Image: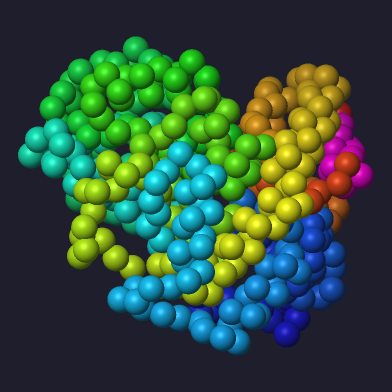
Amino acid sequence: MDSQSIMELTNEHVMHTYSRLPLALVKGQGARVWDADGKEYLDFLGGLAVNSLGHCHPRVVEAIKKQAENFLHCSNLYYIQPQAELAKWLVDHSAADRVFFCNSGAEANEAAIKLARRWGKANRGPDAGHIISLRNSFHGRTLATITATGQAKYQEGLEPLPAGFSYVTLNDLAELEAEIERQGDKLCAIMLEVIQGEGGVNVADREYVQAVRRLCDERGVLLIIDEVQTGMGRTGRLFGYEHYDIEPDIFTLAKALGGGVPIGAMLAKEQVAEAFSPGTHASTFGGNPLACAAGLAVVQTMEDEGLVERCAKMGEYFMEGLRSLGEKHPSLVQDVRGKGLILGLEISRGARDVAGACLAKGILVNAIGDRVLRFLPPFIITEAEIDQVVAALDGILSGMASCN
Ligand SMILES: Cc1ncc(COP(=O)(O)O)c(C=O)c1O
């Protein structure tokens, strides 16, 4: 099928919940993807932080094939070997003691909210179900997670929303302290991303996250960190919270964990995980053999090939390139931010046009609104490929500056 036919078929039959770019991708290898007409693109969007190992990494493909030939699905009424092994790897490499598997980031956060509420009621009192989250956050599209998401545009038309959420501004400690005071015994948790991905690549200050941890300890409430986008090495450390020298009570993963196979995970400290007992939460597909075999291949490959370290190194190189654009185009570039290979370039206008111009040059990047370009390339990206993208951006920004 050619690109045009795929687009027509989609537009006719699939619900219109996405503003799609006019591109039908059918093949991926490493940092490259191809459309149905054979045109090649350099992928700096990475399936929105999913394809950290690059497309179709041979070890992940092999693990999926092997697992598919042997056993695709098994109910959680029985024990599942790849699930147990992936849980052990995650626990061995993180602050958590136990894992609950599900199928997406929203489901992982939904599970975190449920666990925090059960823990609150068991440990703080019958009213302790309130969660403070942050403005500009993004936690998913289920009813509870759009309510935790501090952006009105995701909530419009979906009222009545679940009760028990309020919002504060990232890096404003005084506002958080006042809100904690206001919620009192009703509070059970504070929920945040250490880098707000969908919100515009907004990085939490070190002092802020450390103070939030301290406040949670003082008030006896939980700290939930949403690592759906920042987890699995994306920031140059295995988990984003590691940059802050703190440990969350609960954190969530999805996106990159399965290397492209849908999987989510909610992880917690033992004392918190105890608030779930058999029957309190479940998922038919959660932790299924295929998804966990893919996840195991992802984590083992990341470890064997030193990909988290590579992400940190390439991230520094890319950051330097983006900063050089800031020096060359001071009237357009407002800010360069992020960590590892989740980087944002804020410009005064026209981010969507820049993303469109990149597409025309065979490069996939993401525009968040009209001011932020977000880059999420795979960790296997090379310096030459980063140079190519920086040079393309330089050309596009020069064109825009000369139109002033
Ligand atoms: C930080 C964060 N949390 C949750 C989600 C939701 O994940 P999913 O789309 O897998 O439900 C996303 C998706 O972009 C995200 O970036």
- For the C terminus, the quadrant is top right
Q: Nearer the viewer, residue 402 or 91?
A: 91
Q: Residue at x 60, y 42 (%)?
A: 238
Tell me if 208 is positioned left or right of 302 in this view.
left
Where residue 20 appears, as percent x and y from the top left, is: 60, 61
Where residue 302 appears, as percent x and y from the top left, is: 69, 52
Tell me if 267 is positioned left or right of 44 in this view.
left
Q: Is residue 20 magenta?
A: no
Residue range highlighted in magenta: 384-398
Tell me if 316 is positioned left or right of 399 in this view.
left
Which SS does the magenta portion mostly show?
helix
Q: Does residue 375 lie above or below 55 as drawn?
A: above
Where residue 229 appears, as percent x and y from the top left, is: 54, 46
Q: Please identify the quarter of the rendering in which residue 132 is found.
A: top left
Q: Residue at x 67, y 37 (%)?
A: 236
Q: Does residue 219 lie above or below 128 as drawn?
A: above
Where residue 123 appears, as percent x and y from the top left, is: 15, 37
Q: Nearer the viewer, residue 274 or 140?
A: 274
Q: Nearer the viewer, residue 312 or 399?
A: 312
Q: Residue furthest left?
A: 126
Asked if residue 217 can be seen in this view, the reply is yes
- For the N terminus, the quadrant is bottom right
Q: Does residue 300 lie above or below 129 as drawn?
A: below
